[in-house]
Image (spheres, rainbow, N blue to C red):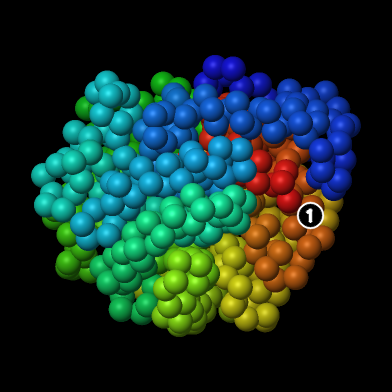
Amino acid sequence: MTADAGPTSVDATAGVDAIADTGPTRADVAGTGGPTDATGLRRLAVDTLDANWEHDHTVPSRTLYPHQWSWDSAFIAIGLAQVRPDRAWRELTSLFRAQWADGRVPHIVFNPALRVGAYFPGPEMWRSADVPGAPTVATSGLVQPPVHALAALLAYRRAPDPTGLAALRRLYPAFVAQQRYLADRRDVAGDGLVCIVHPWESGLDNSPAWDEPMAAVPAEAAVMSAYRRHDTAHADAAHRPTDLDYARYLAIVAAYRDQGYSDRDLAAGHPFLVECPLFNAAFGAAEHALAEIAALVGADPGPHRARAARITEALLRRLHDRGAGTFQPRDLRTDRLVSARTVLGLTPLILPDLPTRQADALVVEARSARFGVARRMDRPLPTYDRTAPDFEPLRYWRGPSWLNIGWLVRRGLLAHGHPELAAGLRRSMIGLVAGAGCHEYFHPDTGVGLGSPAFSWTAALLLDLLAE
Ligand code: 2M8
């Protein structure tokens, strides 16, 4: 298959019970554009990952995102571990080769072989070469949720051989440095949580969660006439962030870059400072994973367990909205929790030490009409409260369903004793790909495929779901 030439969208979120419940048997998927059985789905996923492999990493999409992305590589490694374990380790190794001297893992590692303009904003905007401690290869200066230690642990569990153990040994100090960067340099409020300095750091770029903090970022949509956006040449502009969003994204990048990406004095004037529940849940989950990796590589798990406990405690203290029964981002510029109910709030479920009371409340939120998680889901998990008046079923992270988020929530449901709900979510996610192919995201009502039709983390996480 050719990259970004996956099947087009169709409606089929039901009928995958045979795959979802009994493994690789023929499924009865009515009128679909995707494969109809587990073997076919696996083949599609492997073909998608193979087509997106680029010398030492996997691009998220050949057209929309032709470089290496940080959290994409982590999700991708989880799937690769099953079918191409050597590539799983190369994926993580190439990403961490671009780690900065201060420990930050950049959210984009640019492929120097690509032409200028292959992605916007490219290396000329980030200018990482001007920063002492940045790697030789051009990168962005932002980070993304630290899901890499967890991914490495899960990859090793799928392929527990000497090569994997050697890779864990090599990567362990890099994961520790990544966590140390976040703990030491990004705890802007001094409360034990990491602060993100750009919506791109959340991974959910234009989530309604960022509307309140973004409204305070001074920028005019008109500035975009000076630039050529790359994304809208490959995807419907109505499904992407707006020009005003992009104007603000660029203004925040410029502010951070012009300080040399230094995290000193952020509180004094950086235009976007938010504590995100997903980012911090990943930060805590990383310490839990590192405790297990430490035990495997002969290091001390104790400090990781202690840090994990402190992160969970800080999340509860700072981001838990008791009235709403969910977690909400905190805007550090106003010191207020944002009010939009997004799927970000459910993700602390991945923390195994989340107390039962708060975990139960999250399950209530997940099962509510806002998110519709059920044993038999009639619609996929949306990224935003589907009852909200500004729910947008087509626009990127403002409603559509994404496999990485479903995958995280499913892990959380399993961790907190809800196997039937986890099975319902799994069946729904497999049904999305069976219906539409390895799309980047999916219409949260119809399951129609949106964005890139050959998207790597969809393929990788599908492999992981099929293997369960
Ligand atoms: C999207 O973000 C990039 C910027 O980082 C973009 O829109 O150009 C997000 O979906 C992000 O979560 C993802 O890592 C990236 C690559 O798939 O694309």
| Quarter of the rendering containing residue 40 | top right
Q: Position of residue 129 (x, y in %)?
A: 14, 42
Q: Tell me if residue 239 comes above or below residue 409 in the rendering.
A: above
Q: Secondary structure at mark 1?
A: helix
Residue, x 19% and y 49% (percent of image)?
Answer: 134
Image coords of residue 214 (percent x, y): 36, 53
Q: Nearer the viewer, residue 400 or 65?
A: 65
Hey, which quadrant is residue 128 in on the image? top left
Evaluate whether residue 237 shows in this view.
no
How many numbered discs?
1
x 62%, y 51%: residue: 158
Which of 246 and 280 lies nearest the eye of the viewer? 280
- Could you say where residue 185 lies in the image, as x and y percent from the top left? 26, 68
Few, some or many residues within 10 Å of mark 1 (<14, 14–19, 20+): many
Is residue 1 something one can see in this rendering? yes
Give me the residue at 51% from left, 53% from top: 162
* The quadrant where residue 263 appears: bottom left
Against 337, residue 31 (above or below) is above
Q: Is residue 357 left or right of residue 333?
A: right
Q: Amino acid at mark 1?
A: Ala
Query: In x, y percent, where is residue 244?
Result: 35, 39
Q: Which of the pair 131/204 is nearer the observer?
A: 131
Give the labeled residue for mark 1.
423
